Image (cartoon, grey):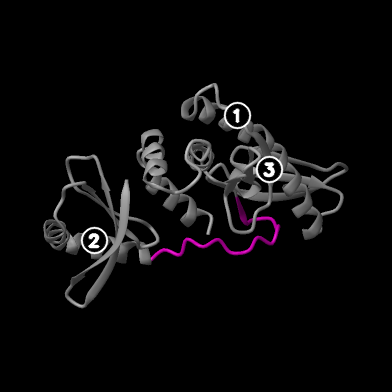
């Protein structure tokens, strides 16, 4: 699947969009929560015909972008105080801090209950981080095994999975066969975790982001673009 950056105009609006050509029969237009627009078109589609389709849907496209603009998806910095919400597997749970004789974090009835004799923000953050790491080890290995079985053949060497905090990436695959996942992914929906793992596993067969790579990724996850945008907006 090949792609290129294009623009079209509607009144005073100049709207950029990403155009993807693939082996499909119809044209698909998508508007994502961050305001970006993508178009999937058949490989033999004429650019003038695509532009005409976009103009016919322009009012809807502008309306969708305006709709999404009213929301602010960015998560404010967490203070680790009772009442704020924290993500886990794509869902938000309210935090309740309870003084107690032991250190423990529990997820009960849609709320995070953190019990500790030390209720300082720094200590609560440490307890939450430890809880997230334990959950990540369990969930990431489950998703890794499922995605590996669905993505690559058994004759490929199994990458070694490690979990770290990454500043700019959700995952990476080293030449030595180490698949690294960002700890923050544990806060994302499972479909987003699967997308990141599958993306990296596709690099076992195609090391670069070339058309063959994207063809394989789309075979495994046909709606990977929407999932990628969902991840970026939710976790921004």
Q: Is residue 73 magenta?
A: yes
Mark 1 or mark 3: whose residue is earlier in sequence: 1
| Residue 64 pos. (x, y %) | 28, 60
Mark 3 or mark 2: whose residue is earlier in sequence: 2
**Quadrant position of residue 89:** top right
Dot 3: element: strand
Give the numbered dot on residue 61. Answer: 2
Mark 2 or mark 1: whose residue is earlier in sequence: 2
Dot 2: element: helix
Q: Is residue 196 magenta?
A: no
Is residue 223 toward the left or the right of residue 201 in the image? left
Residue most toward the top?
Answer: 154
Is residue 200 toward the left or the right of residue 22 in the image? right
The front one of 4 and 109 is 4
> Circle 3 is placed at which residue position?
163
- Disc 1 from disc 3: Cα separation: 13 Å
Give the numbered dot on residue 76. Answer: none
| Residue 45 pos. (x, y %) | 16, 50
**Label 3, residues with CA under 10 Å away: few <14, some 14-19, many ≥20:** some
Is residue 153 toward the left or the right of residue 159 in the image? left
> Would you say the residues marked 3 and 2 are in contact, meaning their CB atoms lie under 8 Å apart?
no
> Circle 1 is placed at which residue position?
142
Is residue 149 toward the left or the right of residue 99 in the image? left
- Disc 2 from disc 1: Cα separation: 38 Å
Q: Which residues are magenta?
A: 70-86
> Would you say the residues marked 2 and 1 are in contact, meaning their CB atoms lie under 8 Å apart?
no
| Residue 77 pos. (x, y %) | 63, 63
**Label 2, residues with CA under 10 Å away: few <14, some 14-19, many ≥20:** many
**For the point 84% across and 45% down, which residue is it?**
100
């Amino acid at each position: 699947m090949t792609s290129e950056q294009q623009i079209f105009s509607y009144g005073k609006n100049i709207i950029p969009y990403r155009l993807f050509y693939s082996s499909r029969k119809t044209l698909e237009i998508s508007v994502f929560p961050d305001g970006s627009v993508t178009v999937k078109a058949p490989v033999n589609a004429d650019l003038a015909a695509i532009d005409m389709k976009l103009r016919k849907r322009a009012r809807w496209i502008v309306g969708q972008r305006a709709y999404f603009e009213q929301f602010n998806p960015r998560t404010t910095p967490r203070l680790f105080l009772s009442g704020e919400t924290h993500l886990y597997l794509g869902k938000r749970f309210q935090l309740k801090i309870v003084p107690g004789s032991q250190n423990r974090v529990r997820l009960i009835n849609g709320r995070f209950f953190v019990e500790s004799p030390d209720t300082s923000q720094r200590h609560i953050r440490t307890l939450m981080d430890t809880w997230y790491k334990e959950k990540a080890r369990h969930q990431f290995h489950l998703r890794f095994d499922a995605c590996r079985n669905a993505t690559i053949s058994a004759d490929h060497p199994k990458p070694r999975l490690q979990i770290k905090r990454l500043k700019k990436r959700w995952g990476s695959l080293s030449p030595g066969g180490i698949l690294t996942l960002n700890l923050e992914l544990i806060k994302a929906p499972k479909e987003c975790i699967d997308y990141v793992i599958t993306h990296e596993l596709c690099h076992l067969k195609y090391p670069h982001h070339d058309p063959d790579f994207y063809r394989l990724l789309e075979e495994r996850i046909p709606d990977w673009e929407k999932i990628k945008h969902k991840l970026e907006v939710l976790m921004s």
